[in-house]
Image (cartoon, rainbow, N blue to C red):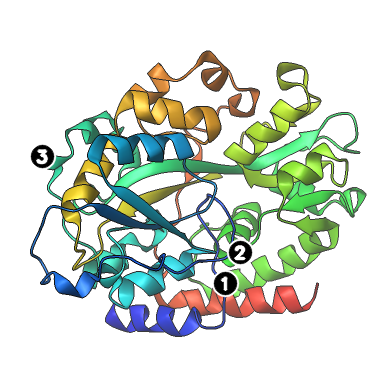
Amino acid sequence: MKRFLALILALTMALALAACGGGNEPAAEPPSGETPAAETPTGEETASTELNIYMWQQYISDQVVSDFEEANNCTVNISYMSDNADAVTRLTSGGGDQYDLIMTCDAYMESLIAGGYVEELDLSRIPNSSNINPAYWSSPNHSIPYLGNYIYVVYNTETCPIEITCYNDLIDPALKGQITSIDGARNLFPMALVALGYDPNSENEEELAEAYEWLVKYNDNVVAYGNAEQNLTNGTASVAFTYDGNASWAFAETGGADSPLTVAPFTDDAVQLGFDMYVIPTGAKHTDLAYKFLDYICDPEVMAQNLEEFPYFCPNDAAVAAAPESYRNDPSKDFDYKENVFFQEDVGEALTIYNDYYQMLKVGE
């Protein structure tokens, strides 16, 4: 496991790993003028006036953050990650020296916990965490789920030349230049593996080689990676392989319930559901505010407010109940995947195989 974490550190210098979800903007360093973290001995908690968070950009309501600052008489400094490799690097290189909360993906939690890079949580200090559905909470002693992301196919029924009911439809030559897609090895390869009838978290190199060949065909049909919402709404693409939150914005911009967009009705192929989670990095200096923020973001009314702006899948059942009707009746959530999903799992040293083939795929663009 330690060897795997060291491997991740090396990979992140050259490879961009896929996100579970959220924004996709360049990372930024902590704001200048922060209270020097080194002044507080490791493990010693003091009353704090600032909270330093590392997470995706455009993934939390400014008003939600502002209300927390006002209620706690503090400043929240948010720095932004460009992919999950950034978060893993921060955590494995002493993230507690700079940050009090770091957002990471469920796929990496096993290794991060084993390596001692995240603090064990005292859930008695996060009473609102009881609102989180335990079915979506794989590591309750070390993380708090924030938002989830179904990664599925959405298409325009008026402009797409075929009906889409499975992943193999995406390599139909009729879709050449019609697909806009999220990127990243751990998002693309699971789709190909499912299409081929394999475990979406396969560590078998022969299966991954087959998945690569499938993705070469898929790549031929992709007109653009990223900006799925924009590419769907401006007509650049008629099909999107994307996150549910981004699909929600596309539906809203194209007529809501009257939108020509539809979620592909997969019945056989499993759909990925990933989660972004907050962790307290080992040695964090402002854990008092970190715990307050975690409890705050789990408050049903707070998260319901957040969902109005960021309509991703929410594992907080009480927040969903409190959310506006527009969220609960969002046409982008009109699907029945809940019994047919898979989660990203830690693939260990097979991650190098994924990334080797992924780089070959990118070179071949």
Say if 86 sits above or below 289 in the image: below
From the viewer's perspective, is the residue at label 2 or at label 1 nearer? 1
| C-alpha span from label 3 to label 2 | 37 Å
Quick check: marks 2 and 1 in contact, CB under 8 Å? yes
Which residue: 66% across, 55% down? 182
Looking at the rendered image, the quarter that the C terminus falls into is bottom right
Kindly tell me whether residue 61 is visible in this rendering.
no
- Classify mark 2: residues with Cα within 10 Å, few (<14), some (14-19) or many (20+): many
Which residue: 85% across, 40% down? 234
Residue beneath disc 2: 184
Which residue: 79% across, 57% down? 224
Residue beneath disc 3: 124
Numbered label tally: 3
Q: Position of residue 50 (x, y in %)?
A: 27, 54
Residue 359 lies left or right of residue 119; in this view the side is: right
Indicate the quadrant where residue 66 lies. top left
Numbered tag placed on residue 113 in the rendering: none
Circle 3: element type: helix
| C-alpha span from label 2 to label 1 | 7 Å
Residue 265 lies left or right of residue 323; in this view the side is: right
